[in-house]
Image: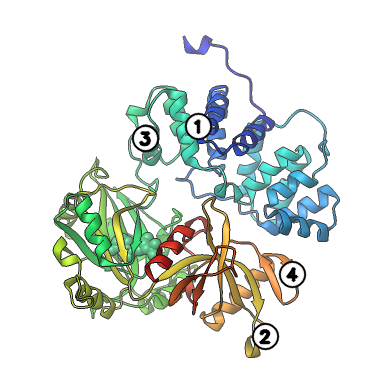
Amino acid sequence: MSDELPQPEQSTFALFAQTAEAVGSTTKRLEKAAILGGYLASLSDEDLAVACKLLSGSPFPLSDSRTLNVGFSAASVVLVDLSGVTANDYHKLVVSMGDVGDVAARIMPASPHEAGDPLLLQEAQAVFEEIASTKGTGKKGILLRNLLSRATPVEAKYIVKLVTGDMRMGLKESLVEEALGRMAGVKTGEIQRVNMLVGDVGETALMARHGLLSTATLHLFHPLKFMLATPVEKPADLVAEANNRGETAAFVEDKYDGVRAQLHREGDRVAIFSRTLDPVTNRFPEVADALLAIPHAVIFDGEIVAYSEADGRCLQFSALQKRLGRKVVSAEVRQEVPVACMVFDLLYLDGVVLLDAPLSRRKEVLASLNLPYPLVMAPTELTSVADLDDGEHEGSGRLDAMFVASRARGNEGLMVKMPASDYSPGKRGKAWLKVKRALATLDVVVTAVEWGNGKRNKMLSDYTFAVLGPERQLLNVGKAYSGLTDAEITEMTEWFKAHTIQDFGRVRLVEPLIVIEVAFDKIQPSPRHKSGYALRFPRIARLRPDKRPQDASTLDEVKAIAEDSQ
Ligand code: AMP
């Protein structure tokens, strides 16, 4: 009987940290997976579930909305205090090493402040949970201090990475999935499928170990990752992609300028999740009410927009922003900024998972549901592939007319979707293509800010920003005066002041956590920036609080746009 088998001992946090170090020290994927596989196999069930979550970047699974929320500043205070280095030296190290975890490993004393039994993995996890459920930076700081007092330098490195959210940029969940595949002797794809359905890599690991992968089912009210789109620069690329897939037509629909939303409903329960998979149900009570009125269990994918029912069209994103800023959505706010949800996909209906069903089928079933307002099925037009390209007469074709019409309706451009494609959560594939021709934009991360001139001299209004490089590192690509409103700049100034890594007087290096959308006229090669490119006439289009740094545009996207605009 299985309970007679010797159980592995409780594993230490030191072993976790050493494993993460070993994985980080090789660039070979197979070696990484082998190291991880060996480690995971040695753990008890309880430790396995925790280790998989931590290695994927957070003590909490994707489907869990808890966050540690220990800011960089709070962690820095604790590190300075425990290490004895001066704040000045500490900040110099952060700037030169570029990673707070690495700095922690460098400055923390070789033997922990509090010698005693080694820190166990489960103990560390318990403290992470306590930090998440504790309110107030001061109290969180005390918990972190107690934990770090027991840590060796390498343990401190990973504790700091985990509590500041920095792990997310490092070890990828996909690597853990690969290692689990090896451990269980199944294909990585099978692990990925289960992980996507249950939304918890720890639970997935246990199912893999105990041969239960085939029993995995989708859990309603656990958000799935969103399917993403790839930008195309010219219509010919749409045709090439469709031909590649043997499609003769593609769905063309407006690209709405709102916030992405995944809607779940079963019985008397509803939930709305944001692009970052956080629950935002209370912000959109009218959408939640409409969901309740559907006589089905469903998961929808859509975009919530500010909407005028009388005109049957979306309002600008800035209108929606008024509403996003509010904590409480009063009746007045509901009236002032009415919203609708443009539903464009159906992932689940009454016990049937539709992720593998072709988009054409998902759209057909969605249309049959007759959604109650303010749920609106996003109009979509099955357009023949021949009509996707303007050929030599650019600006005169069917697609161009659709593009202009979308812009005239106040929307951002077009989305083109392949009818036979399935729904791939978390993937930025080519089954969905976005056409934002007239307005190329990039999502970039603010890395440094500068005091403005003239009436903006008390505001940090000039931003330097970066895209993601091949190693997910940040590479600066430009600098722009803010195109934001004074109210937004004032609010951001406060944020940047509180999240300054180093203050050079005029310029401040800031924690790279703010994502903004920048528009520009052209991208050109340039030695001025680390990325090797510069944007011509960059303008800040808007803040993207719905995006995290790891969602920013990549150097590859920059290169592709630069090549196209030669
Ligand atoms: P981007 O934010 O530029 O990467 O573009 C992708 C985003 O467009 C998605 O995450 C959605 O929030 C949004 N979007 C707007 N309209 C649609 C649509 N019809 N289909 C899919 N995504 C859409």
Disc 1 residue type (three-letter): Leu
Query: Along the horizontal axis of the image, is 492 left or right of 547?
Result: right
Query: Along the horizontal axis of the image, is 486 left or right of 224?
Result: right
**Which residue is tagged 2?**
457
Disc 2 residue type (three-letter): Asn
C-beta proximity under 8 Å, tags 3 and 1: no
Where in the figure is residue 213, as x and y percent of width and height?
A: 37, 28
Q: Residues within 10 Å of mark 1 (few under 14, many from 20)?
A: few
Disc 3 residue type (three-letter): Gly
Q: Which of disc 1 and disc 2 is earlier in sequence?
A: 1
Q: Which of disc 4 and disc 3 is earlier in sequence?
A: 3
C-beta proximity under 8 Å, tags 3 and 2: no
152 lies above or below 290: above
Q: CA distance from mark 4 to mark 2?
A: 16 Å
Residue at (75, 38) in percent of width and height: 151
**Which residue is tagged 1?**
30
Where in the figure is residue 183, as x and y percent of width and height?
A: 47, 24
Nearest to viewer (mark 1 / mark 4) = 1
**Which residue is tagged 4?**
503
C-beta proximity under 8 Å, tags 2 and 1: no
Q: Which of disc 1 and disc 3 is earlier in sequence?
A: 1
Return the mark for residue 68. none
Q: Which of disc 4 and disc 1 is earlier in sequence?
A: 1
Regarding mark 2 in the picture, which secondary structure is present there?
loop
Mark 2 CB lies closer than 8 A to ligand 1: no
Disc 4 residue type (three-letter): Asp
> Can residue 202 be seen in this snapshot?
yes
Q: Which of disc 2 and disc 4 is earlier in sequence?
A: 2
Nearest to viewer (mark 2 / mark 1) = 1
Query: Along the horizontal axis of the image, is 44 left or right of 312?
Result: right
Q: Residues within 10 Å of mark 4 (few under 14, many from 20)?
A: some
Q: Residues within 10 Å of mark 3 (few under 14, many from 20)?
A: few
